[in-house]
Amino acid sequence: MEFIEALQEFLFHQGFQRIKYDSKILWGKDANGKLSMLEIVPPVLPGQKKISLEQREREMADIERQIMIKYQKKVEHLLLILKPGEPDTEERKEAESYPDVWFFDIKAGQLYIYEYQKSEYYNLENDLEPFTQKFLQKKAAEEKKELHQILTPVNTMLVLINVLVFAVLSFFGDTTNAEFMAAHGAMDWMDVVEKHQYYRLFTSMFLHFGADHLLQNMLILLVIGCRLERITGKLQYLIIYVGSGLAGAVASLMFTLAVEPNTVSAGASGAIFGVMGGLLFNILIDVIQKKRHRVEEIGLTGMIFMVCSALSYGFFSTGVDNAAHIGGLIGGFVLTMIIQSITSFILKNRQKKK
């Protein structure tokens, strides 16, 4: 738990030293011939058995006796019980018999010391809350920054468009029905090739067969799309996304619908695989040029694994348009290469003119 790690670092700077004892998180301070111990009790996880204060105090008493016998020193201790909220009535009642217990609300950063408990312990009663407030503020700022990084403008807009289109179509009919989807912009051989309704190459990338299909695609797009947009910028990302979607649709038309003319195809998968292709190109360039990776969280091995996993899922599943996936992947890789080559060429010419 991140807070516990930060708390232990705080205790170290307060002059406490870590004491290794089984699985307990024990810290101690040796001052004036006396050893003062502090046990950090983490919040109880779901499904985890709660240990009573009586048992914890008994265990600490055993540790105290061992230390007193071994080092001939006086020993005192404090249990700092971390909770995601205020102690309830039952916990407060249980703690009445144990003066060496403090409760600490890690969500609000508030320390609870009741009248029957020791009121001070190496100034932690004054320093613990300000430290936690700083930690919580820093954590909130990091989460806000992370949210801004995920919710890049163009990628977020594309996700919202997909969701909105699905919501509207779901209101009027069954999105898992092939005929309904074909009537509302999905691709099929007759409409595209024989009736020349080429707009379906574009509209089909915003349609999804059911909520599961939409949710799966949008979650992947949220995770990887923002990363490519941060590298390429808004306009280039939009071109790569739409271009990859069209490349995937053309591949689907040539290799799936041409073989099975009665099949109806739709989904953002081609565009999403194009985003993967764009990320793969950028990571490869960074590796070749020995630059600092712009997609640090993934890396080349991770990106290759992601692409292979996504492709293999399609190959071993039924009703998946693998041609669209491969077409989108290649389209995204090539488009990113072309766009970044043109951008690099323009920038070099501008620098020469200066």
Image (tube, rainbow, N blue to C red):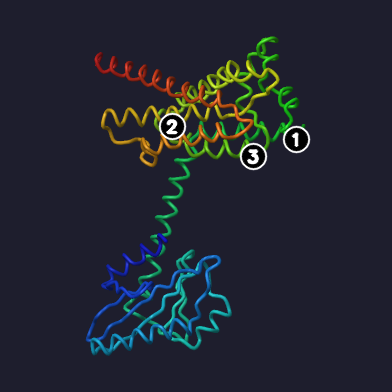
Q: Where the C terminus falls, by quadrant?
A: top left
Does label 1 or label 3 sit earlier along the sequence?
1
Residue 141 horizontal/vertical position (percent)? 42, 51
Q: Is residue 123 left or right of residue 51?
A: left
**C-alpha separation, residue under disc 1 versus residue under disc 2:** 33 Å
Q: Which amino acid type corresponds to the residue marked 1 in the rendered image?
A: Phe
- The residue that label 2 is drawn on is 228
- The image shows residue 66, relative to residue 216, as above or below, that is below
**Mark 1 and mark 3 residues within 8 Å of each other at the beta carbon:** no
- The residue that label 1 is drawn on is 171
Q: Which mark is residue 54?
A: none
Q: Nearer the viewer, residue 328 or 338?
A: 328
Residue 25 horizontal/vertical position (percent)? 37, 72
Residue 149 horizontal/vertical position (percent)? 44, 40
Does label 1 or label 2 sit earlier along the sequence?
1
Few, some or many C-alpha atoms within 10 Å of disc 1 (few <14, some 14-19, many ≥20)?
few
Q: Where the N terminus falls, by quadrant?
A: bottom left
- Could you say whether the residue bearing mark 3 is in a helix, strand or loop? helix
Residue under the point 57% across and 35% down: 217
**C-alpha separation, residue under disc 1 versus residue under disc 3:** 16 Å
Residue under the point 67% across and 32% down: 209
Q: Which amino acid type corresponds to the residue marked 2 in the rendered image?
A: Leu
- The image shows residue 266, relative to residue 57, as above or below, that is above
Residue under the point 74% across and 22% down: 183
Q: Which amino acid type corresponds to the residue marked 3 in the rendered image?
A: Asp
**C-alpha separation, residue under disc 2 versus residue under disc 3:** 24 Å
Q: Which mark is residue 212?
A: 3
The quarter of the picture where residue 14 lies is: bottom left
